[in-house]
Amino acid sequence: MLEVSGLDVLLGDYQALWGARLAVERGEMVALLGPNGSGKSTLMNSVSGLLRPRAGAITFEGEPIAGLPAHRIVGRGIAHVLERRRLFPYLSVRQNVWLGGYHAAARGAREAEYQRVAELFPIVAARAGQPAHTLSGGEQQMVAIARGLMARPRLLMIDEPFLGLAPQVVAHLTEAIRRINRDGVTLLFIEQNVELALSIAARGYVLESGRTVVDGRSAELLRSPEVRRIFLGG
Amino acid sequence: MGLVYALIAAGLSLIFGLMELVNFAHGEFLMVAMYVTFFAWSLAHLDPVVALPLAALALAGLGWAVYHGIIRWVLGGPMLAQVFATFGLAVLLRAGAQFVWGVDFRVVKDPWLAGRVSLGGVFVGLPQLAASALALAAFVALWWFLARTETGLALMATAQDRQAAALMGIDTQRMFALGWAIGSACVGVAGGLLAMFYYVFPEVGGVFALIAYVTVALGGFGNVPATLLAGVLVGLVEVFAGLLISPAMKYAVVFLLYLAVVLWRPLGLFGRF
């Protein structure tokens, strides 16, 4: 479904990705792992069009999308939930979620989609009129994912969904993400906590210093000495 | 007058709120709007009230062209490049007006709305009264557009987080151009209203722009509703300072108020950011 190969990305003068690669099959749930600054977010931002790669290929459902602007890529069926949720702080929860269905391909079924995400995340209905910045971190994350789903994506990418959340909230969110995946949306997410990420995802990719160093099924990665070296420095 | 100040300031505030960029040519945009109104009257015999949509449209076009011709190219650049780009545009427009139209003061003679009316014993100039009402109407229209339309919502989303907005499928470049067009249309309406009772000359933008910056800073940069309140406040302070102290001192009092607010609340009276 999504294939990334040989990706070089510059952030100013600094090269953040060196030939990174990644492949996600339809219906999968894949974790993108790696220490701080390893280029996970840069990779995700390049897929969604926020960054323009210098070299390499990104194809989605067989078509090249590298270099397209972000507002066009969402119409192709990829939604991206940014790190730290990035809701529109002074717009209401309802307006935030509603804007998720802004692009032309999602507008037709907007009302029905809104009902569906409000059912999946009751917080959307409960806090509809409240400005987004008044919500707690966990609530904001749910609204951000609801907003992403409004785009009716076939691939949903979430950057650090569990960052700074309490354990009960993590459990709740994990359940919601599993359900989204079961409903047919392919999922790619970034997470620093290897054990947590691989307990949710079926497969994982590990980045280190801008390169894809290991990938495999979750059970293999958990046993891999390479993964242990990267995350435990052992 | 406060409502007209507020409308000028709203245009400035809208553009700033959208892209953290101060348009130093805002006063010159006002000057252009006043000339558009004047020439609509002197060449086509259109009354300023009739020419108002024309002035708004002309300025919206100017704002759109300035965004695509200049601003777009300096957005990624250093702050100073942005300052000099709009400041240079201000100098160009002012000098261009002097060159093409000369330095004479021009006045729209015998507009439809003239004379005074008595409001509970206080005499108010009819043009001023009409200007206030129309400025308020423009404000309501702006508010309606921002709060009640899909495009207005997309514009506010772009102002609050342009990356997240792009991920919603919003073409942020188009929103920026639209913001410039709408912000400039505000000043177009304000210029058309002012031309009913104020002289038109190349430097006319100066004092109004200065008051607009004060108004925006008073309300809090990028906060459009607060700009309305700040504009009314500035207008009232100006009138009462002129009445109670001396007409020559009215702007001094306005700027003193500005200094006090900035020292006391640097983000403005209703500031966020």
Image (cartoon, coloured by chain):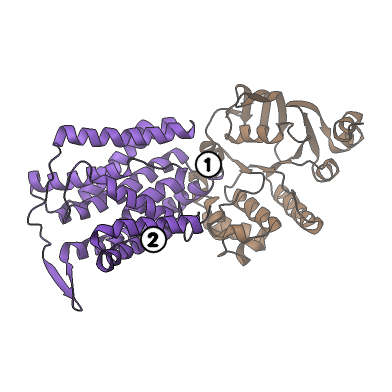
Chain colours: A brown, B purple
Q: Position of B159 compared to A208: left or right? A: left
Image location (x, y in percent) of residue A172:
77, 57
> Are discs 2 and 1 less than 8 Å apart at CB?
no
- Seen from the viewer's position, the closer of residues A232 and B121 is B121
Type of the residue with mark 2? Ala
Whether residue B27 is visible: yes
Which residue in the structure is indicated by mark 1? B166
Q: Which chain hosts label 1?
A: B
Query: Which secondary structure, mark 1?
Result: helix
Q: Which chain hosts label 2?
A: B
Q: Residue furthest bottom?
A: B120
In the image, what residue occupies the spot 87% across and 34% down?
A221
Which residue in the structure is indicated by mark 2? B230
Image location (x, y in percent) of residue B24:
36, 41
Please tell me whether residue B238 is drawn above or below residue A101 in the rendered image: below
Instruction: From the image, state whether disc 2 or disc 1 is nearer to you.
Output: 2
- Seen from the viewer's position, the closer of residues B38 and A214 is B38
Q: Position of A85 compared to B123: left or right? A: right
Image location (x, y in percent) of residue A64:
58, 27
